[in-house]
Image (cartoon, rainbow, N blue to C red):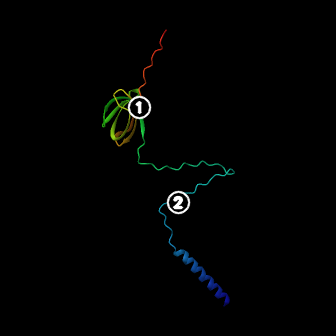
Amino acid sequence: MKRALVVMVALLAMVAFVSGVMAQAPAKTEKPAAPAVEKATPASAPEKAKPADKPKSDKPKAMKFAGAVAGYEAGKMIKVKGSKNKEMTFDVTGDTKMKGEVKEGSKVTVMYKKDGDKVVATSIAVSAEKPPKKAPEKK
């Protein structure tokens, strides 16, 4: 009888613990947890860690173009002829930063970004004109 009582108490205890565990709802996670990065120790074989993916920003990447001014309309557009006769036209907005006075034929560097099918100048820097070299005087 004592033995039956001990077995009965043990069974009831197991049922109580198991039913408590089974009744718990599984934890829901919105995003899976990122795996922890382990540091390699000198004793272990070195493994190459993959660089973390950088989130892509919506901001367009700034690009650069240099050449001579082929055409310019203040506040509207600038046409620049670069090396190898490559010619680009940029929209000029109120946000475009101007450094120097733009004239046809002057050398400029245009920082720009692509906005859909438009090419918008973010800054225009005019290169200082170099004075022509004087020939050495003969005596």
Quadrant of image for the N terminus: bottom right
Q: Earlier in the sequence, mark 2 or mark 1?
A: 2
Mark 2: amino acid = Ala
Q: Which residue is mark 1?
A: 66
Name above or below for residue 51 compared with residue 71: below
Name above or below for residue 139 compared with residue 118: above
* Closest to the observer, 24 or 138: 138
Q: Secondary structure at mark 2?
A: loop
Mark 1: amino acid = Ala
Q: Which residue is mark 2?
A: 33
Sort mark 1 into few (<14), some (14-19) or many (20+) by Cα contacts within 10 Å.
some
Do the numbered discs 2 and 1 sit on residues whose CB atoms are within 8 Å? Answer: no
> Residue 62, image x and y in percent?
42, 40
* Closest to the observer, 36 or 128: 128
Residue ranking furthest to the bottom: 1
Q: Is residue 51 left or right of residue 132?
A: right
> Residue 126, image x and y in percent?
39, 31
Q: Nearer the viewer, mark 2 or mark 1?
A: 1
> Residue 69, image x and y in percent?
35, 29
